[in-house]
Image: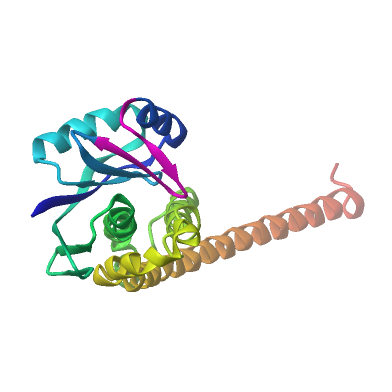
Amino acid sequence: MDRVTAICLCKEFEFRKLSEFFIREHEGFVYRGALTGRYDGHLVVVFDFGCLVTWGHTPQQLEAIKQLVFPYMNTPLSQIVVDEFSSETTDLAMIKNDHIRLAGGDDLEKLAFSFGLAQSVKLDEFEQRAEQTISDTYHIPKRIADHGVSGLSRREIAQLRGRLFVAQSDINLKFDLLDTPEFFWEFPELEDRYTMSSNYLDVKRRIDVLNKRLEVIHGILEMLAEEHNHSHSATLEWIIIWLIAFEVVVFFAHDIFKWF
């Protein structure tokens, strides 16, 4: 049995430069949404969203591969995400108990499985980011319940809202985790391999749960932003009232009582 490792290393790769390097040095070939190559005779699949899947490599070889791609990383993760599987070639394709069975075992079949594995570890990274955001904002509703105020400035609320927007945009728009990869437009006969891995790793449901959790936080921050806007409007109203009152006093003092 071979070792299969899916790993998320960074936010994204400099994909064009990395592709040129793989084509030049590691038998690289570019598909829609993925890059394949070979290291020590075994398949490596690289995805532009910062993930790669290795087929048949030892831990030592995996470390060497990580060093190869390091110069092409944008925003390396402080804590990388890894998922391990085993694989063998049989007469029936399936995935069960973290064991992948390949019906033939050619590179295209491995690539098709790799899409689901890579999406899962990328989603793991998003889930970790969401947990950190939830941890950073957990005190807000509790503080409001205890003290009636959030204790956050308009700037802090805007920064938190920006982080949430980036996270949701990455999940739903930029990295295209919700849709079937375009690779399967060209190889529809392999889409069932992707579906197997994606369903096994529960990718779609996890995305839905993650989006709902982020939406709850977004709702809290929207409420706080509206509260700040209301407070700001009330302050402006009082300033206007005092300016009008001052103008009335000046009018009476100057025009009615002729004090100056």
Residue extending farthest right: 255
Tell me if 21 is positioned left or right of 246 in this view.
left
**Residue 181 coordinates in the image, percent (x, y):** 44, 59
Q: Is residue 36 magenta?
A: yes
Question: Magenta segment, which residues?
Answer: 25-38
Residue depicted at 38% across the width and 57% down the height = 151
Q: Give the camera-side residue of 90 and 59.
A: 90
Q: Does residue 135 show up? A: yes
- Residues 255 and 202: in front is 202
124 or 221, nearer to the observer: 124
Q: Above or below — where is 189 with respect to 1?
A: below
Residue 245 location in percent, x, y? 75, 58
Does the magenta run of residues contain 55? no
Left or right of 260? Residue 237 is left
Task: Check the picture and name the quadrant holding the C terminus.
Answer: top right
Where does the image place residue 183, in percent across and percent down from the top left? Answer: 45, 56
Determine whether 150 is above or below 6 in the image. Answer: below
Which residue is pictured at 27% across the width and 59% down the height?
Answer: 131
Q: Can you tell which quarter of the image residue 103 is in? A: bottom left
Rendering coords of residue 187 (x, y %): 44, 60
Quarter of the image that includes the N terminus: bottom left
